[in-house]
Image: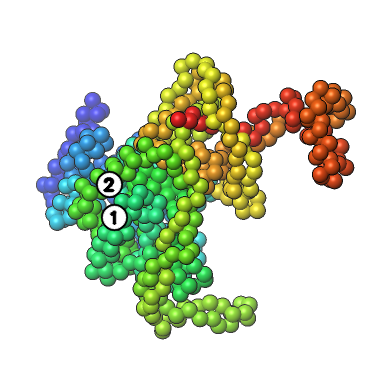
């Protein structure tokens, strides 16, 4: 009864909207005509109004919540009024996903997207762009941060008057959390992304760093994609978007990551690490743009440029949808049957293109604070000059793709994350002895001088030794074949040398600690007995004493040497607990 009443109310509201004319669809920003970004409550209310007004809009919050306990809304815009993922996918619709306020202090994407959706649904010219495209929108991803509103946390940003804070409720930067998924926000995002498998993804941000003339810059994930998608993005899609945004007065430039301290030194791009949204999207062969509007430009101009980008992208997606879907499908299939996979990349510092850059002359003058020389950009001296753009990478570590991985069910934190990311896996139905390739972690470093980074002590420069062993696995341990759509996600999270592997993020640190040891006075006699029965080991000990004076003078090192070469030493210390079933 309650449901029928509810449905009747919705029907009446929609009918009323039609009969009495369109309701007031101005966004909170438009109503203030100023330097204002919507709060979370206003944003949610606006999408609820869109849902009431247009049958092409559906809001859902069924995927999960944010760390502060608020359900995370997702808006789906589908002009066929069909919201079934499978049916939309099989009918050949391209899925564009837009993410806003991951950094809640960088909010114009929130306001620009509300206007963008409203305009698509009310302007016939725009609406037809959705004939072959479905849009998913996370109106505010970092809800916790958006609710933590204040005037000033972005010291260098030109408006709006109030905005949210970068960290979420657990002070995590959500744009570093896509793999480790410490936040509920990221776990929810993982579920949305794996359910919908978007073809194209935009993450809306505001820049930090240098000063220059552009309002609109972008980071593309082209260097992290399959070669055909890379070529399409670089040679066709990005130039076509730029042509349209330029007409709107927003010529684009690649994100200004400078080679040295000022743009004249050249701009640098790179392979996107998967802790970031652009790199995460690349794991699924998804085209991604991180929109970065310039922090020193006025809020309303930034907002307009963000809107212009989204519209220009949509126009091109409508035109190229079939091509993109085909190229993605080819990329995914070729990965599923790849024999090896590259898990690390480095900037190619010798290769570059020349690009035109519209900047301001950089100079130095004495600082009022320190009296020392300080950098400033002279707006009286704008320039347009050719600078180097380092947009090439070279492959590092190649890894042979195993037939499957086996993960003991004890590692539930990792298993949960694989499930959230749509990895297909099966539990062993019996205890089984299986021949596997086993990694031992032989060395690693802690990044950032052992300081915590996003709640972790990130590992890097990992070295391994490999051996084959027949090991016993238990009923319920997980077998994960690599010939699946998530192959790349698996390789780059489970291979411990990958920079954003679960190993790097400390998920397996427990194996790095030895659990048992010996008491010297007892071990002395046992070790002597072992050497007596093993002349080869005794000889090895004597040779080592001769070669290494420090070793020769240390009773402890010698006892340890015998221990490590005895049956008493635990075999599993430093053994990486994800096993490779090789072809
Ligand atoms: Zn940002």
Crowdedness near tag 1: few (<14), some (14–19) or many (≥20) residues, C-alpha within 10 Å: some
Q: CA distance from mark 1 to mark 2?
A: 9 Å
Residue 80 appears in the picture as rendered:
yes
Of the pair 362 and 561, the residue shown nearer to us: 561
Counting from the top left corner in percent of width and height, residue 293 is at: 38, 64
Residue 232: x and y, percent?
29, 55
Tell me what residue is drawn at x 48 percent, y 79 percent: 362
124 relative to 508 in the view: left or right: left
Residue 345 as seen in the image, left or right of residue 218: right
Give the residue at x 14% y 56%.
Answer: 125
* Residues marked 1 and 2 touching at CB (< 8 Å): yes
Kindly state the secondary structure of the residue where label 1 is placed: helix
Looking at the rendered image, the quarter that the N terminus falls into is top left
In this rendering, position of residue 470 left or right of residue 315 = right
Closer to the chain start, of discs 1 and 2, is 1
Residue 469 pos. (x, y %): 58, 26
User: Dot 2 corresponds to which residue?
Assistant: 327
Residue 65 showing in the rendered view: no
Establish if 234 lies above or below 98. Answer: below
Estimate how packed mark 2 is, as few (under 14), some (14 to 19) or many (20 or more) residues with alpha carbons within 10 Å: some
Q: Give the color scheme: rainbow, by chain, secondary structure or one colour.
A: rainbow
Locate residue 364: give its quadrant: bottom right
Q: Residue at x 25, y 28 (%)?
A: 2
From this viewpoint, which residue is outermost toward the top? 430
Of 98 and 168, nearer the camera is: 98
Residue 232's mark?
A: 1
Asked whether 571 or 322 is in front, the reply is 571
Q: Nearer the viewer, residue 24 or 388?
A: 388
> Is the residue 459 above or below the residue 573 in the image?
below
């Amino acid at each position: 009864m309650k449901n029928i009443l509810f449905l009747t109310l919705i029907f009446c509201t929609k009918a009323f909207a039609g009969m009495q004319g369109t309701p007031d669809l101005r966004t909170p920003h438009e109503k203030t005509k100023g330097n204002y970004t919507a709060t979370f409550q206003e944003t949610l209310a606006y999408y609820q109004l869109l849902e009431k007004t247009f049958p092409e809009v559906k809001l859902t919050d069924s995927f999960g919540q944010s760390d502060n306990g608020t359900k995370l809304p997702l808006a789906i815009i589908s002009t066929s009024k069909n919201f079934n993922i499978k049916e939309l996918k099989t009918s050949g619709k391209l899925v564009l996903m837009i993410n806003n306020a991951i950094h809640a202090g960088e909010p114009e994407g929130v306001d620009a997207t509300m206007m963008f959706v409203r305009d698509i649904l009310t302007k016939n010219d725009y609406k037809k762009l959705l004939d072959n495209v479905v849009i998913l929108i996370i109106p505010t991803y970092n809800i916790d941060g958006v609710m933590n509103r204040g005037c000033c946390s972005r010291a260098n940003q030109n408006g709006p008057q109030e905005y949210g804070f970068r960290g979420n409720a657990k002070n995590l930067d959500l744009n570093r959390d896509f793999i480790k998924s410490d936040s509920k926000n990221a776990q929810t995002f993982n579920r949305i992304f794996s359910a919908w498998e978007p073809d194209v993804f935009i993450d809306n941000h505001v820049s930090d760093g240098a000063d220059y003339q552009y309002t609109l810059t972008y980071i593309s994930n082209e260097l992290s994609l399959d070669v055909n998608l890379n070529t399409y993005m670089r040679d066709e899609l990005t130039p076509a978007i730029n042509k349209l945004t330029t007409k709107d007065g927003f010529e684009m430039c690649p994100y200004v990551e400078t080679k040295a301290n000022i743009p004249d030194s050249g701009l640098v791009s790179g392979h996107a690490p998967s802790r970031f949204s652009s790199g995460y999207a690349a794991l699924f062969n998804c085209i991604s743009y991180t929109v970065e509007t310039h922090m020193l430009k006025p809020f309303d101009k930034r907002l307009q440029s963000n809107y212009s980008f989204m519209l220009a992208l949509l126009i091109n997606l409508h035109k190229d949808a079939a091509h993109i879907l085909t190229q993605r499908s080819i990329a995914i299939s070729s990965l599923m049957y790849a024999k090896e996979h590259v898990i690390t990349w480095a900037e190619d510092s010798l290769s570059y293109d020349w690009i035109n850059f519209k900047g301001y002359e950089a100079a130095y003058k004495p600082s009022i604070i320190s009296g020392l020389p300080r950098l400033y950009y002279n707006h009286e001296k704008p320039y347009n000059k050719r600078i180097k753009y380092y947009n090439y990478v070279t492959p590092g570590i190649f890894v042979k793709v195993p037939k499957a991985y086996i993960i003991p069910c004890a590692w539930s934190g990792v298993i949960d994350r694989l499930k959230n990311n749509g990895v297909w896996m099966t539990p062993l139905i019996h205890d089984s002895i299986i021949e596997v390739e086993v990694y031992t972690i032989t060395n690693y470093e802690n990044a950032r001088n052992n300081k915590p980074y996003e709640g972790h002590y990130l590992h890097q420069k990992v070295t391994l030794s490999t051996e084959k062993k027949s090991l016993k696995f238990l009923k319920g341990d997980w077998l994960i074949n690599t010939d699946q759509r998530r192959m790349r996600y698996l390789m780059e999270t489970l291979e411990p040398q990958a920079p954003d592997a679960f190993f790097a993020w400390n998920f397996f640190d427990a194996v790095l600690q030895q659990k048992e040891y010996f008491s010297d006075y007892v071990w002395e006699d046992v070790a002597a007995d072992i050497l007596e029965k093993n002349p080869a080991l005794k000889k090895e000990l004597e040779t080592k004493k001769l070669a290494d004076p420090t070793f020769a003078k240390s009773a402890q090192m010698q006892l340890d040497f015998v221990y490590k070469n005895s049956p008493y030493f635990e075999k599993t210390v430093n053994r990486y607990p994800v096993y490779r079933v090789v072809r």
